[in-house]
Amino acid sequence: MVGGGGEGFLGTSLVAALRGAGHEVLRLVRRRPAAPDERGWDPPAGRIDAGALDGVDAVVNLCGAGVADKRWNHARKQVLLDSRTIPTEVLAAAVAEQGIPVLVNASAVGYYGDTGEAVVDESTPTGTGFLADLCRQWEAATAPAESQRVVRMRTGLVISRSGGLFGTIRPLFALGLGGRLGSGRQYMPWVSLDDTIAAYQFVLEHDVRGPVNVTGPSPVTNAEFTRTVGHALRRPTPWVVPGFVLKAVLGEIAEEGVLAGQRAVPKVLERHGFHFLHPALGAAVAAA
């Protein structure tokens, strides 16, 4: 199998896990290939090195600039869109042209927009806002590969010691600076890194297709999340960061990415018999 975005936070862990399970993994890189497992490509130019996908039985695409890495403006939003849709279009076309059986493509629960307290699964229609539109276009870019098996992984907030959501906020909580964000009523569709990696392996090895929510089975509110992390780190969480402060500091991303949420559940994974290593938030936080 071959992966795009294999050098990122999630990609590095996934490559290691797949190799540990006995799979041969090739990585697509945008620089000159420097290792036996690397193959070159240039998504903006629509180019993949000749022979790079020969004999490949699955493609995993994790490409995409970090949504929360920089404050949003028109130019940054275009980067977020292009960094997702352009590589996806190139890989989807290659999958179709070369008859590669499977394309597993990253997406996110932002697809649903802000859903409040309503429980949402993979049958829920797309929501409104920039993140929902971003995910909708990201997923639509897989269309050229629809003749093959396409899986769109709508991933939630990944909990890991060294990256993702928990890796970012852990130092603050460790210093006793953790606290509720806004009202604290927004839902956080968390998932452990171990379960995220396991879900990718699962869909590669089972006949799963279409959208898949990669979230823990029990999403919690921000208030509950804050209490759970504070308890795990044995630190108080007395603080409340008002919504207007978050908006002033973070801009538009605060409205859609911090103060909004999705009570998303992994209906497709559960229907296919996926077993969660960390079905409860406390276990996921402890593991991180």
Image: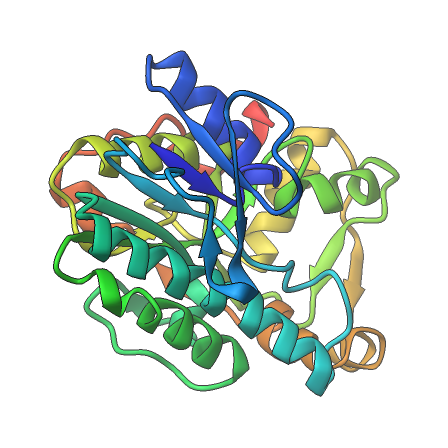
Q: Nearer the viewer, residue 201 or 246?
A: 201
Percent across and percent down for residue 279 are: 36, 34
In the picture, which quadrant includes the C terminus?
top right
- Count how many numbered circles sit on residues in the image: 0
Name which residue lies at 39% across and 36% down: 2
Percent across and percent down for residue 142 are: 30, 64
Percent across and percent down for residue 55 are: 25, 31
The relative height of residue 256 versus residue 154 in the rendered view (above or below) is below
The relative height of residue 45 versus residue 219 in the rendered view (above or below) is below
In the visual, does 97 lie left or right of 221?
Answer: left
Name which residue lies at 70% across and 39% down: 167
The relative height of residue 56 versus residue 113 in the rendered view (above or below) is above
Chosen colour scheme: rainbow
In the picture, which quadrant includes the N terminus?
top left
In the visual, does 73 lie left or right of 77?
Answer: right
In the visual, does 135 lie left or right of 269?
Answer: right
Q: Nearer the viewer, residue 129 or 95?
A: 95
Quarter of the image where one finds residue 112: bottom left
Name which residue lies at 63% across and 60% down: 65
Quarter of the image where one finds residue 191: top left
From this viewpoint, is residue 241 visible? yes
Percent across and percent down for residue 140 are: 32, 73
From this viewpoint, is residue 283 visible? no
Q: Nearer the viewer, residue 222 or 200?
A: 200
Residue farthest toward the front in the current orientation of the protein:
50
Quarter of the image where one finds residue 247: bottom right
Residue farthest toward the right in the current orientation of the protein:
175
